Image (spheres, rainbow, N blue to C red):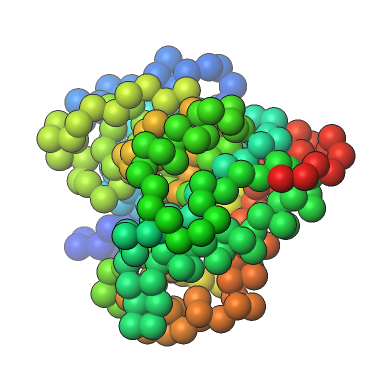
């Protein structure tokens, strides 16, 4: 394990960067965790010893929930803490975030539901010159033929400007018995910019937007049997989007969006940029940029599937 530790002067935060060999051996992280600060934690040194598949970079900072893992920003459920002269990460985060990237195992995928967000009476967020519902539908129409050409069967939840409830979108996926659910959205929030990809908050944990201390105020998250696959899918798609766009990496995030909670298969929700940011909106209004987004999402899905993607079984129509 190669590593770098910095012990700054008083008043500065302590940071650490590790290059890890990342494949969990020894089963559940809770089995080798320690009780620290009323929780189960593992030192970053211990994580490095328990992993030994290829080198990946992990950069973590005390009191922060975001880390850099295999060149992609990921949000943890619990901030990294400093205790006993070391940095610690929660056992849950080792199992729910680090392990799915360290030991990827994409579920074989053939049928994909593409979900262009909003539509009909629900315009979604608005930019100065755009509506989210129009851009998500356009992006889905660009993405579908790319995936079909790679051998996937693709089922959009909508192909026109119609109104669909969130339950209808998920039920459509359930009826089809789809292998993946990919929801397409665009963001809003002042001058913020960048791309983020969401998967479901782990059971009993807090969403990325909520501080850890507020967890008890949240509705319980039910057990998610697709967590590992969803995290790996989100990682692959976010990585491909960053490479294709050079946008700000807002990371793989966690949320309890209904379509993620109720999806019957691995599911992600992509926020492809901020319509509230004037320069990013202008970029998103360019057809060539939306083509790049579509191509990147497709490449991420193919990377997630590895040898188990639809193209390995011959081309299929949508």
Give the residue drawn at x 87%, y 39%. Answer: 314
Q: Is residue 251 above or below residue 315?
A: below
Q: Residue furthest right?
A: 314
Quadrant for the C terminus in the image = top right
Q: What number of labels is visible?
A: 0
Residue 242 visible to an observer of this rendering = no
Question: Looking at the image, which residue is at 64% across and 70% down?
Answer: 291
Assign the N terminus to one quadrant of the image: top right
Where is residue 83? Give x, y as percent: 27, 37
Where residue 317 sits: x, y (%)? Answer: 77, 45
Report whether 164 appears left or right of 190.
right
Judge by depth and name the residue closer to the eye, 295 or 35.
295
Percent x, y of residue 66: 37, 51
The residue sitting at 25% across, 62% down in the picture is 12
Horizontal placement of 244 versus 222: left or right?
Answer: right
Residue in the foreground of this view, choosing between 90 and 255: 255
The percent coordinates of residue 15 (x first, y second) are 37, 55
Q: Is residue 111 visible?
A: yes
> Left of 87 or right of it: where is 246?
right
Q: Nearer the viewer, residue 303 or 286?
A: 286
Using the image as rendered, state which of residue 300 and residue 125 is in the foreground.
125
């Amino acid at each position: 394990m190669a590593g770098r530790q910095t012990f700054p002067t008083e008043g500065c935060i302590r940071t650490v960067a590790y290059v890890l060999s990342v494949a969990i051996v020894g089963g559940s992280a809770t089995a080798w965790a320690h009780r620290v600060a009323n929780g189960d934690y593992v030192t970053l040194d211990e994580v490095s010893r328990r992993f030994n598949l290829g080198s990946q970079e992990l950069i973590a900072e005390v009191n922060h929930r975001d880390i850099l893992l295999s060149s992609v920003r990921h949000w943890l459920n619990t901030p990294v803490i400093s205790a006993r002269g070391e940095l610690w990460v929660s056992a849950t985060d080792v199992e729910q975030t680090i392990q799915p990237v360290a030991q990827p195992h994409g579920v074989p995928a053939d049928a994909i539901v593409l979900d262009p967000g909003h539509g009909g009476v629900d315009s979604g967020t608005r930019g100065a010159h755009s509506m989210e519902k129009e851009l998500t539908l356009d992006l889905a129409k660009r993405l579908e033929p790319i995936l079909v050409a790679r051998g996937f069967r693709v089922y959009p939840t909508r192909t026109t400007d119609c109104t669909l409830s969130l339950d209808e979108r998920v039920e459509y996926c359930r009826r089809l018995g789809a292998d993946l659910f990919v929801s397409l959205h665009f963001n809003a929030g002042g001058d913020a910019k960048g791309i983020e990809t969401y998967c479901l908050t782990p059971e009993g944990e807090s969403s990325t937007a909520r501080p850890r201390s507020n967890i008890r105020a949240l509705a319980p998250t039910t057990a998610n049997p697709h967590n590992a696959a969803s995290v790996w899918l989100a990682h692959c798609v976010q990585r491909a989007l960053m490479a294709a766009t050079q946008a700000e990496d807002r990371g793989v995030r966690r949320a309890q969006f209904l379509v993620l909670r109720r999806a019957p298969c691995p599911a992600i929700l992509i926020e492809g940029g901020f319509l509230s940011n004037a320069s990013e909106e202008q970029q998103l209004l360019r057809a060539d940029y939306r083509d790049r987004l579509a191509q990147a999402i497709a490449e991420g899905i193919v990377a997630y599937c590895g040898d188990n993607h639809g193209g390995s079984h011959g081309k299929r129509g949508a």
